Image (cartoon, rainbow, N blue to C red):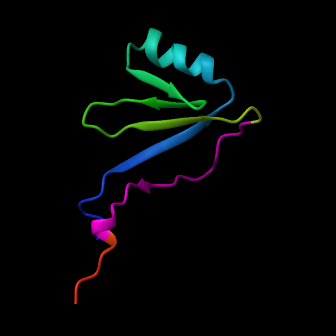
Amino acid sequence: MLEESRAFSGFAAPNIGKVKDFYSKTLGLKVTEEHGLLTLYLVGGNNVLIYPKPDHVPANFTILNFRWTTSILRWTS
């Protein structure tokens, strides 16, 4: 069911401004900001969501996210 789904990742950052400067200015990658969230655009179309969390502590686990479409969720009889 997920073989056609596009995976994406995301992570928290304590300072969105510094993160945006690092990825866009230091590394030269495309980064957009909307509603306080950053999107980091990677080659191949798998983007990274970066969200603010002032008291951020790195996680000790990883979560794999998928973009779902309604066509994936539809069942046929």
Tell me which corner region of the image, top left, top right, bottom left or bottom right, holds residue 53: top right
Of helix, strand and loop, which mostly describes the magenta segment?
loop
Residue 7 % position (x, y):
36, 51
In screen coordinates, is 18 left or right of 38? right
Q: Is residue 26 above or below residue 4?
A: above
Q: Is 64 placed left or right of 61 in the picture?
A: left
Say whether residue 28 is left or right of residue 45.
right
- Nearer to the camera, 37 or 47: 37
Q: Residue at x 46, y 31 (%)?
A: 39
Q: Reply yes or no: does residue 60 show up in magenta.
A: yes
**Direction right: furthest residue:** 55
Name of the residue lying farthest toward the bottom: 77
Image quarter hosting the C terminus: bottom left
Residue 29 position, x and y percent, is 38, 19
Question: Is residue 65 shown in magenta?
Answer: yes
When asked about the image quadrant of residue 72, the answer is: bottom left
Q: Residue 22 appears at what percent x and percent y?
A: 52, 15
- Which quarter of the image is occupied by the N terminus? bottom left
Left or right: where does residue 46 sit relative to residue 77? right
Residue interval drawn in magenta: 56-72
Q: Is residue 9 above or below residue 44?
A: below
